[in-house]
Amino acid sequence: MSRREFTVGPLGERARAWLSGEVADVAQPRSAATVMLVRDGVEGVEVFMLRRVATMAFAPRMWVFPGGGVDPRDDEPDLPWAGPSPQEWAQALGCDEGMARALVSAAVREVFEECGVLLAGPSSDTVVADLRDPEWDRERVALLDRQQSLSQLLIRRGLVLRSDLLSVRAHWLTPEFEPKRYDTWFFAALLPSGQIPDDGTSEADVAEWTVPNVLLAKHRAGAVLMLPPTIVSVEDVAGAMSAASFVASTGSSSVIKPDLLERAGQAVMSVDLPERVPSPVTRSGGGRRGCR
């Protein structure tokens, strides 16, 4: 374990009120999934990120990865599936089979909704390569409007979700003092060949490939905002030798929950970060390793 401390940022006033006992209500966390979509760039591994619009209730103006909350229909049992099974993912994520199916489904759905990348294909060893047809934009809108579920989309299109294209990196729980809380699993995936992520989401005003060390330097200078889980995740990408090796490795499913403390009159979030552990599971899809 390694201990880190982070400033509380824009929530400083609420953090101080929590420490003084003026605020005691604890929001129920919502299950969520987010995806670090990576590729090899000129300056090393790059990760696709979004800057949330200023009007968002949670994490306004923060740089984040594509992701969001689990939808009740993400756990549909008829979801076309290839790769490690929901039962195997349940072992990897430390949850029951239904939640594992929902989390993996939510990860795939959210990355498609928010940047137009679809981790699915016609078979267990193929991936959709060209999503430029306007029909795919309509499919995204139908998902966002809850007119269809991911399962319905894949069945109608004759596709299967490729769970082997994902690996788990981390599991974070929002601190109790925050007014909106998420129980979030962080996944990683390689950008599929032929697909191009875009800025089609209304939740962000910037969507682009980022160089981790450049983004971290901007954060240290106060030019960009990131939450602690994002900072740690971007640091992980910065240390990767290649995009493929980053996705092939695995993190920990042990929950990371920052504690709110007072240091020299200032509120800080203190967190114990687990060591990385190797994955014992060999997956299909280019020899990358998955999570059990």
Image (cartoon, rainbow, N blue to C red):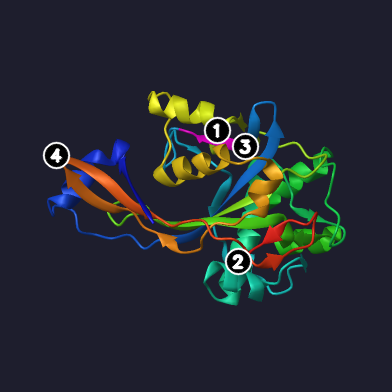
Residues rendered magenta in the picture:
47-53
Residue at disc 2, secondary structure? helix
Badge 3 element: strand
Query: Considering depth in this image, is 197 or 171 the residue closer to the camera?
Result: 171
CA–CA distance between discs 1 and 4?
31 Å
Q: Which mark is residue 155?
A: none
Q: Amino acid at mark 2?
A: Ala
Give the residue at mark 4: 264
Determine which of the numbered discs, if any, sits on residue 48 in the image.
3
Residue 145 visible: no
Q: Earlier in the sequence, mark 1 or mark 3?
A: 3
Q: As shown in the figure, which amino acid type bears the numbered disc 4?
A: Ala
SS category of the residue bearing label 4: loop
Task: Tell me what residue is drawn at x 57 percent, y 61 percent.
Answer: 71
The CA distance from mark 3 to mark 4 is 37 Å
- How would you rate the neighbour count of disc 1 (Cα within 10 Å): few for under 14, some for 14-19, many for 20 or more? many
1 vs 3, front mark: 1
